[in-house]
Image (cartoon, rainbow, N blue to C red):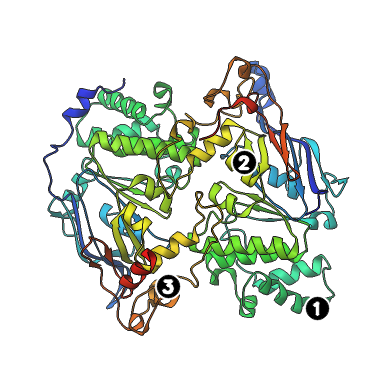
Amino acid sequence: MIMTETDLHVLEPDPSDRTLLLEINDLRVGLRRGRTETTIVDGVSFDVDPRTRFGIVGESGSGKSMTLRAIAGLLPGGTEVLSGSIRYRGTDLVTAKPSVRRGLMGPEIAMIFQEPMTALNPVRPVGDQIAEGPRRHLGLSKKEGRALALEMMGHTGIPDPVRRVRAYPHELSGGLRQRVMIAMALACRPKLLLCDEPTTALDVTVQHQVLDMLESLCAEVGAALVFVTHDLAVVNKTCSDLAVMYAGRIVESGRTSEVLANPRHPYTRGLLDSAPDFDQPGRALVPIPGLPPSIANRPPGCAFAPRCSRAVAECDSAAPILTTSTDHRTVACFRAEASGSEISA
Amino acid sequence: MTDAPVLEVDDVAKTYDVSAPLLQRLFRQQQRTLLTALDGVDLELRRGEILALVGESGSGKSTLANILVGSLPATRGQVVQDGSAIPARRDKELSRRIQMVFQDPYSSLNPRLTVRAMLSELLRVHDIVPRSEVRKECLRLVSLVGLDEDALDAYPGQFSGGQRQRIAIARALAVRPDVLIADEPVSALDVSVQATILELFASLRDELGLTILFIAHNLAVVQHLCQRVAVMYLGRIVEVAGTDEIFANPRHPYTRALIASIPRMGDTSGAADLVPEGEPPSPYDLPTGCRYHPRCPFAEAQCRELDPSLRPLSESAGRVHLSACLRASDLPESP
């Protein structure tokens, strides 16, 4: 029932394959009404290497989920990709034909959603739902599909899969449902797994188990992760690299450990200072004053300037561009150098 | 802080009858099935403290909150306020004294009432201030929670999540309650907003001497805000202690598991072996003996047979450390 070591390695991609898996270039997502465009995601660029784990952090309305949905081609009605490209192994998903895209979703790219109860089909047994992708894309028979569903359920740590394969989503707990979602997403062995807050709806103990399982299973299958969350501690646990988004733009990115230990952008620092840290119990919380700008009414300069304690006149007039410094840190802030030196001082 | 408890929960239990219909039961010769949501909970809330109630979903935190505010009747036991038991049916005066703030500020406010209409209705119905002073009192309430006067004439839809939560708090405070029950009040909010709401709770405690039962799952938040922590597991309270004490010296394996599961900002290794396997057992089919033994790394033969009760272990600075673990005193030192 449990897949053997050799079975897994047969399907693993060639480790020498070092080409970029996902390359997002100046992506803009928004609403278009006649000639007016309302931009939700405003010029986002990042790359994901095969088998790496990339986190996108931001508050609600920052555009992190929209970026993810644009990659999956699941933008909500009315919104669309306005410009830019999303290249998956060289194929631009924005201009690709729907049939090409459909062929990729499942065997190449898969997605996990925040709320498994609404993402799963309530009137089909979970085993059938896990087997659906492999049967369609890999041409498995009904029997083979059932066997694969059992294997995947075992891999995701669902106890007693033989009984649970016939269960309906409502018969499972939140943690088990999320495991079913992960089993479904990884059943076709995708190279890229998109996760939209996959553990936000789960209890801490279950969250810990699910993150550990997701991490090891992705490593086994050879999938890269793009992980969207609002929780910096979860990114710290899960992702090697991260990008911080604010008002539709990436404001800072880099190695997770470096960015969190020594943030250069005032917003990243604000996020860290406003969240209670279990390891620093006495520290006072410093909230970020004000609110994020509304999507329709973003300021012309740096979107964070109205809330930023370090803002100067320059910040209100021009939007800072994301620049990479000599020490491989990427920040979009005119005062980044200053805030960086102040922190290290 | 005085030591007299403002609210005492005395052996409160809640069971739901989830049996099949009578005829079906007779026909198939089934027994009645009972779901135990709360099973003999004892808890004290002292004046002017914020007590945290933590535990996984299904542990009975929200059921207890609903019993405390009177929206659910208890099956057994009683809630005692200032020395007198609260009857099953509360009159206006009794229901005024315990108020609740809900998790989701988007669904807990009436979208068709302005903030002023919402607050003045409460002030009039409960006769909190003379009618002539209702306007003034509304203004006092919104400024208490850090909103401008303009907020009074706006509808909930015009506010952000954090502002709505402030309005929900103002609404709960309007009737001048003795105890505030906050059911996950910050978990629907963004981090930067969460900090301001936590500050608001702390200032309400420090300035008004308000007693708050703070239901949460984020232990970092609990550690920041609360004086004492009660940990719930499957309808029971398994450990109660002062915040510093419980995090430095947890004396129940479940508490240790919760602490080990917290995603950390620092080094992420270590203590991972304490994270429990599996999920809580079904409340329809509770394990014998200690309810945590199927997931507990320290379980012994006695844990499978004896059902431990909450017992005092030590006392420091007037705060008793209670634990419901048979091995509470001989658990290995926590890492």
Q: Give the class, few, some or many, for how many residues have Cα within 10 Å of label 3's Cα (few <14, many ≥20).
A: few
Residue type, numbered disc 1:
Glu
Q: Residue at x 88, y 46 (%)?
A: B84
Whether residue A11 is situated above or below residue A211 in the rendered picture: above
Chain letter of mark 3 equals A
Counting the numbered discs, the total is 3
A157 or B113: nearer the viewer: A157
Disc 2 is placed on an element classified as helix
The image position of residue A338, as x and y in percent, is: 34, 73
Disc 1 is placed on an element classified as helix
Q: Residue at x 41, y 38 (%)?
A: A210
A17 or A22: nearer the viewer: A17
Q: Earlier in the sequence, mark 2 or mark 1?
A: 1
Q: Residue at x 37, y 82 (%)?
A: A312
| Residue holding disc 3 | A294
Q: Give the position of the C terminus of chain A as an image quadrant.
A: bottom left
The span from disc 1 to disc 3 (Cα, nearest Å) is: 37 Å
The image position of residue B122, as x and y in percent, is: 76, 66
| Residue holding disc 1 | B133
Q: Residue furthest front?
A: A345
Chain letter of mark 2 equals B
Q: Give the class, few, some or many, for how many residues have Cα within 10 Å of label 1's Cα (few <14, many ≥20).
A: few
Whether residue B241 is situated above or below residue B32 in the rendered picture: below
Chain letter of mark 1 equals B
**Which image quadrant for residue B270?**
top left
The image position of residue A207, as x and y in percent, is: 45, 41
The span from disc 2 to disc 3 (Cα, nearest Å) is: 42 Å
| Residue holding disc 2 | B246
B310 or A336: nearer the viewer: A336
Q: Give the position of the N terminus of chain A as an image quadrant.
A: top left
Residue type, numbered disc 3:
Ser
